[in-house]
Image (cartoon, grey):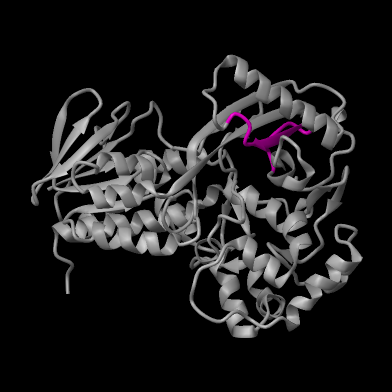
């Protein structure tokens, strides 16, 4: 049996790894092929190392609330490479009216758990604080209908909380307007808290013990909320690639179309060649999968095309530490949309993780949506980098120019989980399940983080494998 995985990001690599694991466990012969349209594996994960610097052009760490990446690392034999974030620098600042103000201790996404710290914070007006406190007596919403994140937050906490904290926090995760984001798809835990406790604040305080360190693995090792790898996130990609047999990976091989006669999938590649496969995992953005399946199933293709995406740029700026005398000891700074700046967030990579830069330098990651609608050339890149440098000077007080920078644009890479997203995904899953040997994977469906992608990839691998080989009783 032949199985093809299209997409060499974390989802495709994990799916391929798990398919091989299933084949070994169940003693089945599999001819596996992984197609990657680009010249490298890893997708948005990209680590650049030089002269003592370890720079992340994509995600720099992994949330450990879900243990999937920890467990995957254990299977790959790289658990010893896991490092925790520097908890002593774990503060986050909000840029508010020209000042950097620390997010109150115990503030979790949209609500405070440390009331004293919240009441002392200059981030909120007196009315804003009263409005947030009123959340504990506001009746919960009845019914099962989805609502936007904007609607939920303003209904329970007021607009000031939305504009000054929630929007920049959520914007840093989804690069999207909260008025378009589905609450069910992005923050379902808050729906449950409202239903169960009648108040998000009460629910958070009740469950706050679960938000600290979590134990995982037989060794009893403890990890912080976020972890990375000693040599950068590429460690995970490299380990997955190394686990695949030779000749499995085909770079610069873009899948254009996939058609089925019920028994086989006929594949058309960008070089004009064709191939056949018994099983197919599309670990690709939904809009790319839509085009691939357009000739096979118009309805499924249309549903996939309805999942919208946003684009963003990540600029890494390397400064001498002496040129950033006012930079706070923190993980980063969030900039609310109401401040009308050109950067939506700064992440201080060298403060967040050890051994990312020599002690006399710092690495600042700048996130911006500038250039989202433009084709990036040298001039556009220079303009965006220049803007990020200017914002570093204005917001962070940089007094000198960076000694090095990297630039990466992610075109239509982050899905927008708009209102009704869960219903769309359910419809897509029902249609995909009608096809033997077909599965979809990636960040378009059940979560945008790396752990979500790993879990989705495992499910996709199992779906295709057991479509072809009956699941043992």
Question: In the rendered image, which quarter is residue 149 located in?
Answer: bottom right
Q: Is residue 419 visible?
A: yes
Query: Where is residue 44 drawn, in percent x and y?
Result: 49, 38
Question: In the rendered image, which quarter is residue 462 located in?
Answer: bottom left
Return the residue nearer the eye: 99 or 157: 157
How many marks are shown on the rendered structure?
Answer: 0
Q: Which residue is depicted at the point 83% across and 36% down?
A: 396
Q: Is residue 330 above or below residue 34?
A: below
Q: Which residue is depicted at the point 26% across and 39% down?
A: 292
Query: Where is residue 370 drawn, in percent x and y?
Result: 63, 31
Q: Which residue is depicted at the point 66% across and 28% down?
A: 52
Instruction: Tell whether position 359 is magenta.
Output: yes
Instruction: Tell whether position 7 is magenta.
Output: no
Q: Is residue 121 above or below residue 40?
A: below
Q: Is residue 252 above or below residue 180?
A: above
Return the residue nearer the eye: 391 or 89: 391
Q: Quadrant of the C terminus?
A: bottom left
Query: Where is residue 164 drawn, in percent x and y?
Result: 77, 55
Query: Where is residue 470 drawn, in percent x and y?
Result: 14, 65
Judge left or right: residue 260 versus residue 175.
left
Q: Is residue 360 visible?
A: no
Q: Which residue is depicted at the point 23% across and 23% down?
A: 271
Return the residue nearer the eye: 198 or 52: 198
| Magenta-colored span | 354-371
């Amino acid at each position: 049996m032949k199985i093809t995985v299209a997409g060499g990001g974390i989802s495709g690599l994990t799916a391929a790894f798990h398919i091989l694991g299933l084949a070994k466990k169940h003693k089945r012969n599999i001819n596996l092929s992984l197609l990657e349209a680009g010249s490298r594996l890893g997708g948005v994960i990209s680590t650049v190392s030089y002269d003592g610097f370890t720079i992340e052009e994509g995600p720099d760490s992994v949330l450990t609330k879900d243990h999937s990446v920890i467990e995957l690392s254990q299977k790959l034999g790289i658990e010893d490479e896991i490092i925790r974030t520097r908890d002593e620098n774990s503060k986050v600042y909000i840029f508010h009216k020209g000042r950097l103000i620390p997010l109150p201790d115990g503030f979790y996404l949209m609500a405070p758990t440390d009331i004293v710290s919240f009441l002392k914070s200059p981030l909120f007006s007196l009315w804003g604080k009263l409005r947030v406190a009123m959340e504990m007596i506001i009746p919960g919403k009845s019914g099962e209908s989805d609502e936007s994140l904007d609607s939920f937050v303003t209904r329970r906490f007021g607009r000031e909380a939305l504009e000054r904290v929630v929007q920049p926090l959520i914007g840093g995760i989804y690069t999207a307007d909260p008025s378009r984001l589905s609450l069910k798809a992005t923050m379902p835990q808050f729906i449950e808290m409202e239903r169960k406790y009648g108040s998000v604040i009460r629910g958070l305080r009740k469950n706050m013990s679960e938000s600290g360190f979590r134990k995982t693995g037989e060794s009893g090792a403890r990890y912080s909320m976020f972890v990375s790898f000693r040599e950068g996130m590429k460690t995970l990609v490299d380990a997955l690639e190394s686990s695949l047999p030779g000749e499995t990976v085909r770079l610069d091989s873009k899948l254009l179309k996939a058609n089925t006669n019920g028994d086989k999938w006929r594949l058309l590649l960008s070089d004009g060649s064709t191939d056949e496969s018994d099983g197919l995992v599309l670990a690709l953005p939904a809009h790319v999968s839509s085009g691939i399946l357009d000739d096979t199933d118009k309805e499924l293709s249309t549903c996939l095309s309805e999942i919208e995406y946003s684009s963003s740029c990540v600029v890494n700026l390397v400064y001498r530490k002496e040129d950033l005398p006012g930079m706070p000891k923190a993980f980063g700074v969030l900039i609310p949309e109401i401040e009308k700046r050109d950067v939506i967030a700064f992440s201080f990579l060298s403060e967040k993780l050890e051994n990312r830069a020599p002690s006399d330098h710092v690495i600042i990651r700048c996130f911006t949506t500038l250039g989202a609608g433009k084709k990036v050339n040298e001039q556009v890149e220079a303009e965006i980098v220049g803007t990020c440098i200017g914002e570093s000077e204005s917001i962070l007080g940089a007094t000198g120019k960076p000694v090095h920078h990297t630039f990466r644009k992610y075109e239509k890479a982050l899905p927008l989980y708009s209102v009704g997203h869960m219903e769309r995904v359910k419809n897509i899953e029902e249609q995909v399940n009608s096809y033997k040997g077909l599965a979809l994977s990636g960040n378009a469906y059940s979560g945008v983080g790396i752990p979500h992608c790993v879990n989705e990839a495992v499910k996709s691998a199992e779906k295709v494998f057991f479509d072809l080989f009956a699941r043992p009783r």
